[in-house]
Amino acid sequence: MPEVTANGVRLFYQQSGTGPDVVLVHAVTSNSAVWLFSGLVDALAESYRVTAYDMRGHGMSERPPAGYTSADMVADFRAFHAALGLGPAALIGHSFGGVVSMHAAALAPECVNGVILSDSFFPCLKAEEPNFGKMSIWTEVRDTFARVGVSLGDVVDFARLFRECAALPPEKMKELEDIYGAFGRGWLRQLPKLAETTCGDDVLREAGLTVEVLRGVRQPVVALYDEFSPFLATCRWLEQHLPRCVAEIVPAAKHLAMLDNTAGFTDAVKRHLATLFPPR
């Protein structure tokens, strides 16, 4: 993968196809491989120039000790966008990647043509989601770690997750790797590295993306939320309060629609991208 230095941080990326720009923004603890593994890059590269990158601290990108709020990630994205000479892009953001995408729409509107969200939770809307700590993907992680004697507590706490992973003896890490298998192993091995950073706390901060700023986004927004998402109240809020937002539910998915229902997710993304970039 090529790399570029943006906002003082080396970021790795992959680019495929030609046409209007589409940028894929992964979730916290994930990386650009999720888009490649799901086939979304290849599916979109038939009609668009698709750029998937690893955010700071993730994948193959540089891992500075601090600067992991959505505002920090937007500063990286803006410099990354300029360094690659991208045009106004459709941003497809999963989970925290959607928060970064919406914050980019607010802070760098010249870079963003529209946003497609995938099951994103916004810290400023926490009051809308009283069951945030009970999200299924977190309870599954918590229960899996409990199998090797590690307690992660009752609420979502990325910082604690990272610290506990960093403190695991090798034999316990091997047990977890065996449980998660080949694809999950890469995700798991990234977590101890993030313990060296402020990422765990930063990603749950508003960082300037207040309710008022969110409501002020003027670009088209597509809220793709999973059928079994814990964040369906957020989906409804976005549809009701953003000036140009449409919502759609991806069936048979619970937070990772690009993997849980690859065909359904890809179809929805392609349909909505066609409205952001109408054929000439």
Image: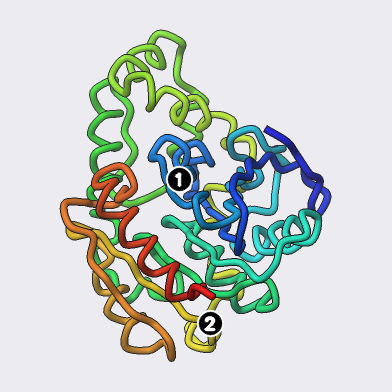
| Image point (70%, 77%), residue name | 110
In this picture, residue 94 sits left or right of residue 197: left
Task: Pick out the residue farthest to the front.
Answer: 280
> Residue 94 is drawn in which quadrant?
bottom left
**Which-is-in-front pick, marks 1 and 2?**
2
Above or below, 84 relative to 185 = below
| Image point (30%, 54%), residue name | 265
Above or below, 209 relative to 196 = below
Q: Where does label 2 land, which residue?
A: 219
Q: Which quadrant is the N terminus positioned in?
A: top right
Q: Which quadrant is the C terminus positioned in?
A: bottom right
> Residue 236 is drawn in which quadrant?
bottom left
> Residue 128 is drawn in which quadrant?
bottom left
**Count of picture labels:** 2
Above or below, 232 relative to 183 = below
Q: Which dot marks residue 232?
A: none
Q: Are marks 1 and 2 in contact (CB under 8 Å)?
A: no
- How far apart, in angstroms, are the residues tagged by discs 1 and 2? 31 Å
Q: Where does label 1 land, which residue?
A: 158
| Image point (59%, 39%), residue name | 58
Q: Secondary structure at mark 2?
A: loop
> What x and y, as percent, mark residue 249?
23, 66
Mark 1 belongs to which amino acid?
A: Phe
- Sequence order check: which comes first, mark 1 or mark 2? 1
In this picture, residue 11 sits left or right of residue 244: right
> What x and y, as percent, mark residue 32?
53, 41
| Image point (23%, 34%), residue name | 143
Q: Residues within 10 Å of mark 2 (few under 14, many from 20)?
A: many
Mark 2 belongs to which amino acid?
A: Gln
> What x and y, as percent, mark residue 154?
27, 48
Q: Secondary structure at mark 1?
A: helix
In the image, 70 versus 269, the foreground residue is 269
